[in-house]
Image (cartoon, helix red, strand yellow):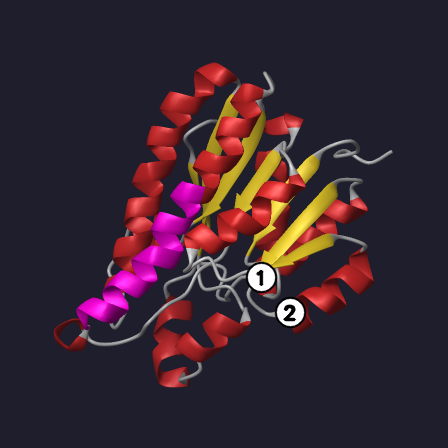
Amino acid sequence: MGAFSGRRALVTGAGKGIGRTVVERLREAGAYVLALSRDPADLATLARDTGCDAVAADVADVEATLAGLRPHGGFDLLVNNAGISRLAPFLQTTQADFETVLAVNLVAPMRIAQHVAAAMIAAGRGGSIVNVSSIAANVGLADHAAYCASKGALDALTRVMAVELGPHGIRTNAVNPTVTLTPMAAQAWSDEAKAAPMRARIPLGRFAQPVEVADVILFLLGESSGMLNGVCLPVDGGFSAA
């Protein structure tokens, strides 16, 4: 019997990186997991390897995503991990790119959390929600105008959710990783001239691995963090302390 036996979890952005690792860890700990990703090929290998159930959906189309989730019933745990970035200098950032990033990184987590939390409340049970944010919520990163704005707003949303859902026994927290070596980060930080100064600002001298973030997410989902609510927890090797 694992720590999450009998628990039902929904993980978005589950095809790669942090989300995929969270699914693997939750399955190892006994949870039922519904994995959501826009890439059916990623979901097929994830389902094969872990035994999770899967829904192929792009959270940018949140109405279609919610329609795909409704037949699967309620959940005890939610990890809002899906995220994108559109890199451009501030003066060249387009409104279309800005709105696309906010649709995936902010609007979708809000709508999916509303769907999941409403079912938790209707069932008369509590639960735990973790929003995957970023250190970009708290610092300005060149070429990341839309991404930084989306993650700053996600942290603010996390705090409001904690205040409003807490009385129903639903805890909401966020993790704020430094650069984590996922496929998306590889694109954003592939230029060593850009990556080296960023690493130099991290006292541990390296970027994070997906499993290091996933394990913190599982901690926030679990009973050991039962009095944590509204926390935006840095997973940054000391970046925010330097």
Residue 211, labelled with which disc? none
Q: Quadrant of residue 102?
A: bottom left
Q: Is residue 105 magenta?
A: yes
- Residue at left 50%, top 60%? 204
User: What secondary structure do most residues of the magenta stretch adopt?
Assistant: helix
The percent coordinates of residue 172 (x first, y second) are 47, 32
Distance, label 1 to label 2, CA atoms, is 7 Å
Q: Quadrant of residue 24?
A: bottom right
- Residue at left 75%, top 68%? 45
The percent coordinates of residue 185 (x first, y second) are 47, 71
Q: In the drawing, does residue 185 fall left or right of residue 152?
A: right
Read off the magenta span.
Answer: 94-111
The number of discs equals 2
Q: Is residue 207 magenta?
A: no
Establish if 188 lies above or below 237: below
Which residue does the numbered mark 1 point to in the structure image? 37
The percent coordinates of residue 235 (x first, y second) are 49, 50
Which residue does the numbered mark 2 point to in the structure image? 40
Pick whichever, 191 or 155, lies toward us.
155
Is residue 173 visible in the rendered image? The answer is no
